[in-house]
Image (cartoon, rainbow, N blue to C red):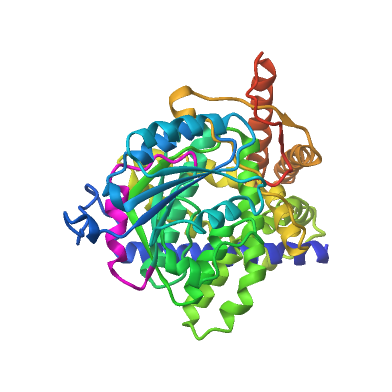
């Protein structure tokens, strides 16, 4: 029982530390009067009507098997407001399916209309997305480099809103906020949208405003070419090449600018398998970047708060093994206590402080929803759902963290982009793996623990146990529903089968 008590205490300490960081971020955001409303402000300091006053800009569109959204992306970017003679577009197409034909047709269409656009196909997908971006830079003419993933739909004035910020020679990146094309498709996409809103509005916003390190989110941003080169260029030795380059650039002294009022809508994964893959990649890639970066971060003369916040940013993946350990230990520990041979009351009283971690998370989500949506009170009613949904990925993300720490490499597997906003949901087949089975086991285990706590009279502990049960149950339920819908369809999408424990994109 002592061992279980130590494990549980360690897990709660981790959750408390990161919860308190969320509290600090939310507090700083509120103190800065971040509760803004109204239209997006007009950009200041536009270069003017003289075309040559605008910097040369290269727009890179990295694609890999994106036939559902490739044409939409190209057509949207081809009509962005920017002086025609100062813009070139590179469609970096590593596809192995009919996407290449779709891209070729749209590129030819826009070339005939005088647009400076090229279709770049590599013979091998070396370095994945990072390799494609680096390859495009070898012949890019732009002083600025804008990047959009396949599922993004930038507003027409995106470049007019971002480029003027580069009048400050110290700015290396301008990052926009992600919006959502399909947040209301299901409870799954609604949960994802809320989690991303908190990241962009609170985490990115406060880190940027307080001079701490923020990150390029892989898309919907504009880089200064000199910043990329000075930081060492794109590297493929982590699964989050965007985060890696961001920290290398900021450690070189470059400053970033986040634009919370400029939203760029994108598609959210519609299946639990796709979301699991995406979160696996982000978790594993962040852990890989932490291994690569933390020592260098702490050997700088940066202010202590910058190093501390950077460390918490790069080690946020520790939350997932902490959740998993707490889920495994919580019910046995409390049931034993109720039966009279467990930990003393004083121990449980101290551990109860760990629940304050959820105060910071709640405030971060509250302020983000209030900043973005007029109906934020209704949306906040779903907050427990948002929170428990992410807890259900603890197994998969812990696996990603472990692989990163053991330096096990894995390929970059794309997140499916299916143009669901105009067409509705597309369901894809997914294989049953040991991870799928373990998630079902965890859901049943947590449910059994909830019953045990109720039977033993530990009603105070029941809500915490219920969160674990709902979290793992959420993942299992959505997986089962989507697997059944895919099985009931006569025709599947031609995309390859999704392996649920494979690394994602």
Does 416 sit left or right of 37 as displayed? Answer: right
**Residue 160 x %, y %:** 27, 52
489 up-or-down from 146: above or below: above
Magenta residues span 150-171
Is residue 251 visible in this depiction of the protein?
yes
Q: Residue at x 67, y 31 (%)?
A: 479
**Residue 6 x %, y %:** 76, 67
Does 262 sit left or right of 249 as displayed? Answer: left
Magenta-span inclusion, residue 84: no
14 up-or-down from 454: above or below: below
Q: Place residue 501 in its image quadrant.
A: top right
Is residue 319 visible in this depiction of the protein?
no
- From this viewpoint, which residue is outermost toward the left? 49
Q: Nearer the viewer, residue 172 or 303?
A: 172
65 up-or-down from 196: above or below: above
Q: Residue at x 58, y 81 (%)?
A: 298
360 up-or-down from 468: above or below: below
- From this viewpoint, which residue is outermost toward the top? 490
Does 176 sit left or right of 497 as displayed? Answer: left
**Residue 156 x %, y %:** 30, 42
Q: Residue at x 67, y 56 (%)?
A: 284
How many marks can you see? 0
Q: Nearer the viewer, residue 164 or 426?
A: 164
**Residue 372 x %, y %:** 34, 46
Name the quarter where the N terminus is drawn: bottom right
Q: Place residue 52 in its image quadrant.
A: bottom left
Q: Nearer the viewer, residue 138 or 167?
A: 138
Q: Residue at x 58, y 66 (%)?
A: 314
């Amino acid at each position: 029982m002592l061992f279980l008590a130590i494990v549980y205490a360690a897990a709660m300490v981790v959750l408390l530390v990161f919860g308190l960081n969320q509290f600090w971020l939310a507090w700083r955001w509120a103190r800065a009067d971040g509760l803004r409303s109204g239209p997006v402000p007009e950009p200041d300091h536009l270069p003017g009507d003289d075309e040559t006053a605008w910097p040369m800009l290269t727009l890179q569109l990295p694609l890999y098997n994106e036939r559902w959204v490739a044409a939409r992306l190209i057509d949207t970017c081809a009509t962005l407001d920017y002086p025609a003679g100062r813009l070139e577009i590179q469609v970096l197409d590593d596809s192995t399916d009919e996407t290449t034909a779709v891209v070729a047709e749209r590129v030819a269409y826009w070339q005939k209309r005088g647009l400076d656009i090229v279709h770049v196909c590599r013979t091998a997908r070396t370095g994945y997305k990072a390799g494609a971006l680096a390859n495009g830079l070898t012949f890019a003419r732009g002083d600025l480099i804008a990047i959009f993933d396949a599922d993004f739909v930038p507003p027409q004035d995106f470049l007019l809103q971002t480029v003027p910020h580069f009048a400050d020679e110290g700015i290396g990146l301008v990052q926009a906020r992600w919006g959502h094309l399909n947040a209301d498709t299901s409870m799954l996409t609604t949960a994802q949208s809320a989690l991303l809103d908190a990241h962009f509005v609170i985490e990115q916003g406060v880190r940027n405003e307080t001079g701490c390190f923020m990150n390029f989110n892989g898309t919907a941003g504009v880089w200064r070419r000199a910043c990329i080169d000075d930081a060492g260029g794109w590297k493929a030795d982590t699964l989050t090449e965007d985060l890696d380059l961001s920290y290398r650039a900021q450690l070189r002294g470059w400053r970033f600018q986040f634009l919370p009022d400029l939203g760029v809508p994108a598609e959210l994964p519609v299946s639990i398998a796709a979301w699991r893959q995406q979160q696996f990649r982000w978790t594993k890639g962040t852990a890989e970047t932490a291994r690569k970066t933390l020592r260098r971060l702490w050997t700088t003369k940066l202010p202590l708060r910058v190093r501390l916040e950077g460390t918490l940013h790069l080690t946020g993946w520790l939350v997932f093994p902490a959740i998993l350990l707490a889920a495994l230990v919580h019910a046995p520990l409390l049931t034993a206590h109720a039966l009279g041979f467990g930990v003393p009351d004083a121990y449980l009283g101290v551990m109860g402080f760990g629940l304050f971690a959820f105060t910071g998370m709640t405030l971060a989500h509250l302020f983000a929803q209030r900043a973005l949506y007029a109906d934020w009170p209704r949306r906040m009613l779903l907050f427990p759902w948002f929170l428990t949904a992410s807890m259900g990925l603890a197994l998969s993300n812990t696996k990603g963290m472990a692989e990163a720490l053991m330096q096990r490499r894995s390929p970059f597997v794309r997140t499916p982009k299916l143009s669901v906003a105009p067409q509705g949901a597309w369901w894809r087949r997914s294989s049953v793996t040991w991870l799928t089975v373990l998630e079902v086991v965890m859901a049943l285990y947590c449910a059994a623990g909830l019953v045990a706590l109720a039977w033993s009279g530990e009603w105070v502990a029941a809500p915490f146990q219920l969160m674990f049960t709902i979290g793992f149950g959420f993942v299992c339920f959505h997986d089962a529903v989507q697997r059944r819908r895919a099985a009931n369809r006569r025709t599947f999408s031609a995309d390859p089968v999704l392996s649920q424990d494979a690394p994602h994109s």
